[in-house]
Image: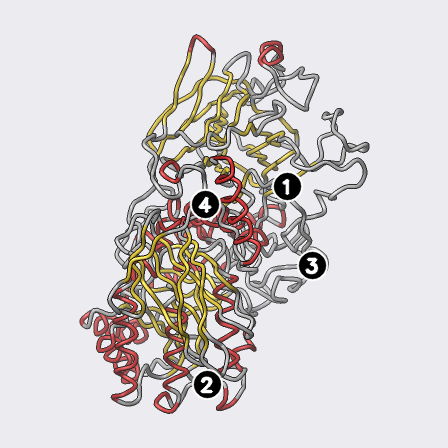
């Protein structure tokens, strides 16, 4: 009977998964699932002298290193699945100094590269030409970004954990300290790795390239012939000089998710913005199935455009920071939940989510008027939008005084004030714009023409922004077209030496500025993937001309953007758009002004964004035009604030909008009082009744759920063996309904 029950349970589970658009396969023991219940173990670093080993672990992931005859990682394990991620020993890093390549750490002599045994580990030897292990140090983690939380957020805490640093030396470079650093975090299967190079010598050293991670991983699929062309199949969309090339994709192992803080591309997705992850072939792996040894099973992490920087005496270089998140499932939803947990842990600033609107004017009377409207309706901030006339580069006394007075007025009302600034998609002049390595003239940038952030103008641009924020007290920075990876062949720009170091130096300038903003509590919208260095929000992903389509079409398209843009982003990481006034055409059918004449559409757009926990850019001259409009806005914001915590929680994707039947999302928060919140839509012109199967495993509910539909008296429902509830709902024509679960 027991065996029959197990079979029945899994048949039911998989039939449910096949009939829906999600696949949230529960773990066997929810109470031990790290996505539901924080595990007891915290990060520890265990030194075992008798074994000649150091192990970093947190109960979810472990990584073990042999210390002699040289340091080498010999075990990398997912403790949830007990999966071994290593098949062979590789160097700890690889660096190119003064034109010559050196291995850092690592051991030699492994014969069978398909797997690694204890006996073979003991037989491996060191190579005197490699950088040799000198010492190690252990300490508590320190913040990478000194964020000062001052806005509403769901996680005000910086990540906790341990730092392990291995120091290496080489006889060719007396006084040069190469350090391989590992950060391991509490209660998440995540490790960060990076390399620092400290020049304590009396001479300068050219750092051509740093490969900060090399992992020989088991292949998850095998092919006798054929190749994924791993070095060609890059998601960068640019070649080594930043020239645009068609982006291509390749299948990467599902057991590990890699992300670094060196990403750009305006794709508004991490995988397409990545510039450092390279899945390569391993010719030393001669027992692989592929006859030509073309299996992409060797992970190397390094910037595609090499740094090419000169490290002066007394200076320190830090490589990209590589975050390695171990996955225990092929399920898209679970993988996304793990990635979202990663962002909330290592970049807690992204959990801030202020309620703002976009004003299209900078006339003082208009700004004060919208500040008053925000204060009266519950909005928290105003961004002086593109086209408003704001110029943060104007450091004149009159400009600073004007906006300082407006910021003071806003703060007096409890409202944030911020503004928009355009950087890269503009042309300044020939001595300022990036110089093409092909023509020696301005051009060939991501946006055609763009200024170089390392030019005299670019360096002044950053200082002018700092001056503006310091002097005015502005709270929000919307940086449009930030540095997208353009290279510059100029040899006269003070911020870089030439083409080779131009990308690295510009990236460092931008990162420093974003960290500066975080130290002062300045909130940042930026349309590229700079979350790991301090930005807070990016677009969900959209086509701008869609906002010139009729309002009814925008509603469904926006819900599609929400559904598609929240698999790997938390709600607070994305923004949408609502054109109160005309934007790129479309006429009266596309806009909401006059607001009082389109209240139904206005409220529906607010509900679908706020109901997803997502802020939209409500761009126009006002939030309301009549008392009735004011009440609709205020009631919607009050509704959002009442359920704000659960509406900013993770999204489980129920059914993608297709205009043919219901669509919806489910928020889940196993740690919250409100465990789940479901929002369902009807795109049809007639009312519908549906029985929706709600997957509640990730809500933390396991036996019963009290469900209140639109604030009605809660009713108790029993969960099925696979943590689902069948909820019968009525959804009005072209309308929506919602329910909260406790």
Q: Quadrant where the C terminus lies?
A: bottom left
Sequence order check, earlier mark of 4 and 1: 1
Image coordinates of residue 631 in percent, x first then y, are 25, 82
Label 2 or label 3, whichever lies nearer to me, is 2
Give the camera-side residue of 233 and 212. Answer: 233
Measured Cα–Cα span from mark 4 to mark 3: 45 Å
Identify which residue is drawn at 61% across, 40% down: 253
Label 2 or label 4, whichever lies nearer to me, is 4
Give neighbour class at mark 1: few <14, some 14-19, many 20+ (Cα, 10 Å). Answer: many
Sequence order check, earlier mark of 1 and 3: 1
Q: Extreme top residue here?
A: 50
Q: Give the residue at mark 2.
A: 591
- Name above or below for residue 669 compared with residue 593: above
Measured Cα–Cα span from mark 2 to mark 4: 38 Å
Give the camera-side residue of 240 and 338. Answer: 338
Is residue 501 visible in the rendered structure shown here? yes
Mark 2 element type: loop
Q: Give the residue at mark 4.
A: 338
Q: Give the residue at mark 1.
A: 278
Query: Quadrant of the rendered structure where residue 450 is?
Result: bottom right
Sequence order check, earlier mark of 2 and 4: 4
């Amino acid at each position: 009977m027991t065996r029959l029950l197990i079979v029945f349970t899994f048949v039911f589970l998989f039939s449910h998964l096949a009939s829906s658009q999600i696949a949230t396969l529960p773990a066997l023991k929810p109470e031990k699932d790290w996505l539901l219940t924080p595990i007891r173990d915290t990060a520890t670093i265990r030194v075992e002298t008798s074994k000649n080993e150091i192990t970093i672990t947190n109960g979810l992931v472990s990584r073990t290193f042999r210390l002699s005859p040289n340091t080498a990682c010999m075990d990398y394990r997912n403790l949830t699945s007990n999966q071994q991620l290593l098949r062979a020993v590789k160097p700890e890093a690889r660096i190119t100094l003064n034109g010559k390549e050196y291995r850092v750490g690592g051991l030699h002599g492994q014969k069978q590269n398909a797997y690694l045994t204890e006996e073979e580990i003991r037989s491996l030897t060191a190579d005197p030409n490699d950088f040799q292990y000198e010492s190690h140090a252990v300490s508590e983690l320190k913040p990478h970004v000194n964020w000062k939380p001052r806005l509403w957020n769901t996680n005000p805490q910086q990540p906790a954990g341990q730092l392990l640093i291995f120091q290496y030396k080489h006889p060719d470079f007396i006084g040069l300290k190469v350090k391989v650093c590992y950060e391991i975090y509490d209660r998440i299967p995540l490790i960060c790795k990076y390399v620092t190079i400290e020049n304590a010598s009396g001479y300068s050293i050219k750092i051509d390239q740093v490969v900060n991670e090399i992992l020989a991983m088991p292949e998850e699929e095998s092919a006798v012939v054929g190749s994924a062309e791993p070095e060609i199949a890059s998601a960068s969309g640019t070649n080594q000089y930043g020239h645009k090339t068609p982006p291509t994709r390749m299948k990467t192992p599902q057991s590990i998710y890699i992300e670094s803080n060196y990403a750009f591309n305006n794709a508004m997705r991490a995988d397409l913005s990545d510039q450092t992850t390279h899945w390569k072939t391993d010719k030393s792996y001669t027992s692989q199935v592929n006859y030509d040894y073309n299996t992409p099973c060797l992970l190397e992490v390094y910037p595609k455009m090499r740094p090419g920087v000169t490290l002066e005496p007394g200076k320190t270089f830090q490589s990209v920071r590589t975050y390695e998140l171990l996955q225990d499932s092929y399920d898209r939803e679970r993988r996304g939940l793990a990635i979202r947990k990663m962002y909330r842990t290592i970049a807690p600033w992204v959990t801030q989510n202020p309620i703002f609107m976009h004003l299209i004017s900078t006339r003082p009377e208009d700004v004060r008027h919208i500040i008053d409207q925000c204060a009266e309706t519950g909005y928290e901030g105003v961004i002086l939008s593109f086209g408003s006339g704001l110029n943060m580069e104007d450091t004149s006394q009159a400009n600073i005084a004007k906006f300082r007075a407006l910021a003071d007025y806003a703060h007096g009302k409890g409202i944030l004030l911020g503004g928009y600034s355009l950087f890269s998609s503009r042309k300044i002049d020939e001595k300022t714009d990036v110089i093409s390595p092909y023509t020696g003239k301005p051009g060939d940038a991501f946006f055609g023409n763009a200024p170089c952030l390392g030019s005299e103008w670019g360096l002044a641009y950053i200082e002018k922004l700092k001056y503006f924020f310091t002097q005015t007290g502005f709270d929000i920075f919307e940086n449009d077209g930030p540095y997208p990876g353009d290279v510059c062949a100029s040899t006269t720009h003070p911020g870089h030496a030439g083409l080779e170091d131009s990308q690295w130096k510009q990236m460092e300038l931008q990162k420093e500025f974003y960290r500066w903003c975080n130290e002062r509590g300045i909130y940042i919208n930026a349309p590229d993937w700079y979350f790991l260095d301090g930005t807070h929000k990016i677009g969900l992903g959209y086509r701008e001309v869609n906002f010139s389509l009729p309002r009814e079409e925008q509603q469904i398209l926006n819900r599609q953007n929400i559904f598609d843009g929240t698999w790997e982003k938390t709600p607070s990481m994305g923004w949408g758009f609502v054109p109160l006034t005309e934007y790129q055409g479309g006429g009266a059918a596309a806009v909401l002004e006059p607001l009082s004449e389109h209240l139904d559409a206005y409220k529906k757009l607010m509900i679908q964004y706020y109901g997803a926990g997502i802020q939209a850019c409500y761009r126009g001259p006002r939030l309301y035009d009549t008392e009735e409009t004011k009440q609709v806005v205020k009631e919607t914001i009050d509704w959002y604030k009442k359920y704000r915590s659960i509406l900013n929680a993770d999204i489980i994707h129920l059914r993608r909008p297709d205009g043919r039947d219901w669509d919806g999302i489910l928020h889940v928060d196993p740690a919250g009082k409100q465990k789940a919140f479901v929002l369902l839509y009807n795109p049809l012109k007639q009312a519908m009744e549906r029985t929706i199967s709600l997957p509640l495993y990730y809500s933390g509910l396991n036996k019963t759920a009290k469900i209140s539909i639109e604030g009605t008296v809660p009713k108790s429902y029993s969960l099925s063996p696979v943590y689902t509830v069948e909820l019968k709902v009525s959804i009005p024509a072209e309308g929506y309904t919602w329910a909260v679960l406790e």
